[in-house]
Image: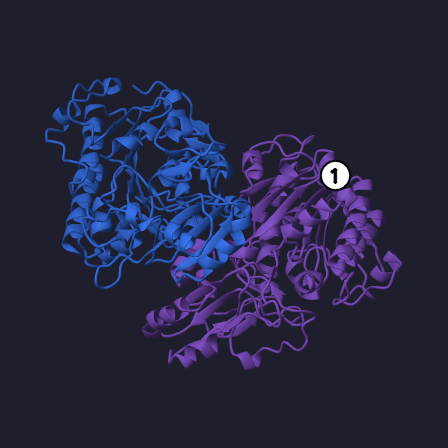
Chain colours: A blue, B purple
């Protein structure tokens, strides 16, 4: 039951309209614009095409750096950069030198929009594919569920005893191609069970995108199934926003060999002292990418940095190397959770630490990954035309994915004017 | 006479408090943070140090790409990115294929904060060193003057018959080391003549920064004179903001030879068809940099782009290469005024077109320049402590220079709460 009387709430200094109709944001993990462009060209996503033909809009926007899952999901749900929400990677080194997976809510420094709504008794829901992300997104009292733990788990907040029973279909494993679609099904099932739900966030997984390029059979199957479920949400009257946490690029040679610079090896071979090479793509699910992405943090003595820069500059496909202070400014990162140097790689180049520590034997296919600047552009799609103060920047393609909730809650028609601008 | 009764104005969808006390923003052309850090370390800027000790703040922020004069001055005075104000360079190619210096107000797509204030009868003033920038900044009815044209020019809006007479000192030439300081003197002189002035913008020139690194004699002389004049503004009771349009880096080898990739030559030698290499640093004042900076736009047939990318990827110090659509999103650029490909270079590498077309004989010293990502970090300095909704981002060093007027007008103490957040 929606008991709130507030018309707006404020989260992290932005004002959001409290949605009066069901609203959902989908984050397609690894949903590079290339997938959507190709699918629309070949007309295999009729519901998406119909939504756009009926006034919805599709523009590009930018995700956060590094272009990874955790920093971007948190920016999308908080509306702020990693500098403010505190999570600049899936993994990082803390000031005391410990290496941490950033999956624990204790690392969060900003509440989600959903948590603020929940505190005002507005019914919200977070659905993730993987359990690791559910813990972060559910922080602050937001009802949250994951595909990974759907079997045998209930959601007492909305009177659900067993999620899998509610969906009526057995939950797939998180490496199955349709794990993402089960997350979409979970959101729909809960809404049909509890129609007071006002804001849903559904975060998919990029297992298919890591394995297949646009136009490949598995990718098509993923997008067609996404489209069908999108249609079900539209038929239920949802206002819809769609984005991606990051894009995706091939990081391998034509013969399938990964194109990787192993930075610990390279620097040590050159006689440069390095304490740590931290790869923020690292997560517990290594079969997607073998912990190889296009971004790395180096920890090394100050006396070694000039030499490290010279060695890095000579590596083809290494793009940017930033000192900590500049990296914090340029990437909007929390300065206490990033390296002495930040390194990015080109679209088709990945960065590793020690070659012997990266197990690529479990990869589903030739290496496709993300983490760098070239996976920053993402789609920002809305189910109705955008108006109001963000419209010009949206149409110019220069919003950030962290603006999507502002766009969807405050800037679609039949809404009162955006309260904060 | 300040006849306005408005307490706030709205410019480009941001609300600004109408200043009740004299307020000035200085844009130090090429004012890389390295200059200020070094000067503060060596205690040669006592007024700046005193301002910071008394509660003022100095943080890093990011300028716009390319890190050049025109895009950044316009972002600072409009509060929006080049995507919205329309000026992504000092120079660009238009859709009809013509090459244009972007010095004419007809290219502007957004009004300045100052123009909106002026329309509400709030006394404002733009002071530039070079006339080319005065025309852009003065657009929309803002009283504007330049050092270049100070002699023999009046400012009827404020009852001034001859600017040089008002200052009482002969105006220097625009290549003189102290041309910037004369701009600061002009602002002071007009304020002392017309104490109703409420918002001044004073934009300096980077002739000294192009020629000398932090700690060199001429650079010190520049900063010491800046500091003395800053003190005069503080003594007059001004609220002060200081930033830079871009940073500055050496782009030469230890022996003084410029480190340049001449892209037209490189691509033609590789058999790649290229229609135009457009260098947006180009301006009528080539003695600073010989039109060599760290950013270039390429215009070339679609069929040649993959090959061009491969050739560029093999050049040491070429960092990013973006397609037009991605470049617009990543750099927040107007898509109709940028190239088919956008190319950036490393901190110490510059990009040219044809070697024979760049006349470096007039350079004041070994090449120092800007235009790339590595000249994006700039100082954001305020004369009083920052509070309110931008404070967390400011302290994290992740604001943009386009946020400086918001910071100075809405977020310093003894001000009412910021109206728009």
Q: Which quarter shows the N terminus of chain B?
A: top right
Which of the chains bears the disc numbered 1? B
Within 10 Å of the Cα at label 1, are there few (<14), some (14-19), or many (20+) other Cα atoms?
some
The kind of secondary structure element at disc 1 is helix
Q: Nearer the viewer, residue B26 or A228?
A: B26
Position above or below: A9 against A330: above
Q: Which quarter shows the C terminus of chain B?
A: top right
Q: Nearer the viewer, residue A242 or B279?
A: B279
Report whether A410 appears left or right of B57: left
Residue drawn 24% across the image and 57% down it: A38
Q: Position of residue A92 (x, y in %)?
A: 40, 38
Q: Position of residue A163 (x, y in %)?
A: 17, 25
- Asked whether the viewer can see residue A217, the reply is yes
Q: Position of residue A402 (x, y in %)?
A: 41, 41
Residue drawn 14% across the image and 29% down it: A167
Q: Position of residue A356 (x, y in %)?
A: 29, 48
| Furthest residue in direction left, as rendered | A169
Q: Nearer the viewer, residue B154 or B360?
A: B360
Report whether A110 appears left or right of B44: left
What residue would you read off at disc 1? B51
- Asked whether the viewer can see residue A30, the reply is no
Position above or below: A200 against A176: above
């Amino acid at each position: 039951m929606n008991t709130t009387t507030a018309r707006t709430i404020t989260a992290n200094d932005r004002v959001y309209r409290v949605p009066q109709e069901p609203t959902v944001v989908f984050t397609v993990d690894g949903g590079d614009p290339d997938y959507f462009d190709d699918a629309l060209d070949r007309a295999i996503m009729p519901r998406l095409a119909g939504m756009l033909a009926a006034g919805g809009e599709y523009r590009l926007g930018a995700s956060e750096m590094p272009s990874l899952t955790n920093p971007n999901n948190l920016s999308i749900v908080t509306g702020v950069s990693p500098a403010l929400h505190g999570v600049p990677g899936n993994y990082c080194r803390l000031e005391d030198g410990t290496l941490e997976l950033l999956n624990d809510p204790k690392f969060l420094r900003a509440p989600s929009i959903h948590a603020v709504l929940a505190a005002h008794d507005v019914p919200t829901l977070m659905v993730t594919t993987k359990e690791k992300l559910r813990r972060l997104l559910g922080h602050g009292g937001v009802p949250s569920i994951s595909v990974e733990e759907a079997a045998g788990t209930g959601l007492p907040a909305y009177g659900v005893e067993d999620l899998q029973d509610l969906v009526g279909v057995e939950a797939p494993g998180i490496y199955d191609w349709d794990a993402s679609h089960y997350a979409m099904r979970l959101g729909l099932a809960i809404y049909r069970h509890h129609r007071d739900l006002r804001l849903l966030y559904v975060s998919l997984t990029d297992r298919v995108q890591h394995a297949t390029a646009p136009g490949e059979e598995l990718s098509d199957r993923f997008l067609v199934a996404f489209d069908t479920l999108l249609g079900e949400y539209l038929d239920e009257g949802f206002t819809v926003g769609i984005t991606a946490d990051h894009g995706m690029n091939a990081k391998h040679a034509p013969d399938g060999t990964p194109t990787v610079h192993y930075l610990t090896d390279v620097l040590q071979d050159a006689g440069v002292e390095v304490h740590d090479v931290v790869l923020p793509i690292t997560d517990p699910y290594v079969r997607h990418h073998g912990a190889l992405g296009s971004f790395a943090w180096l920890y090394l003595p100050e006396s070694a940095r000039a030499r490290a820069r010279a060695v890095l500059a000579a590596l083809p496909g290494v793009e940017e190397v930033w000192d900590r202070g500049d990296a914090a400014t340029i990437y909007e990162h929390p300065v206490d959770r990033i390296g002495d140097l930040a390194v990015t790689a080109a679209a088709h180049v990945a960065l590793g630490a020690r070659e012997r520590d990266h197990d690529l034997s479990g990869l589903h296919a030739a290496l496709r990954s993300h983490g760098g600047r070239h996976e920053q552009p993402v789609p920002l799609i809305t189910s109705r035309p955008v108006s109001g103060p963000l419209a010009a920047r949206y149409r110019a393609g220069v919003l950030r994915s962290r603006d999507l909730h502002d766009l969807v809650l405050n800037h679609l028609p039949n809404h009162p004017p955006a309260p904060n601008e």
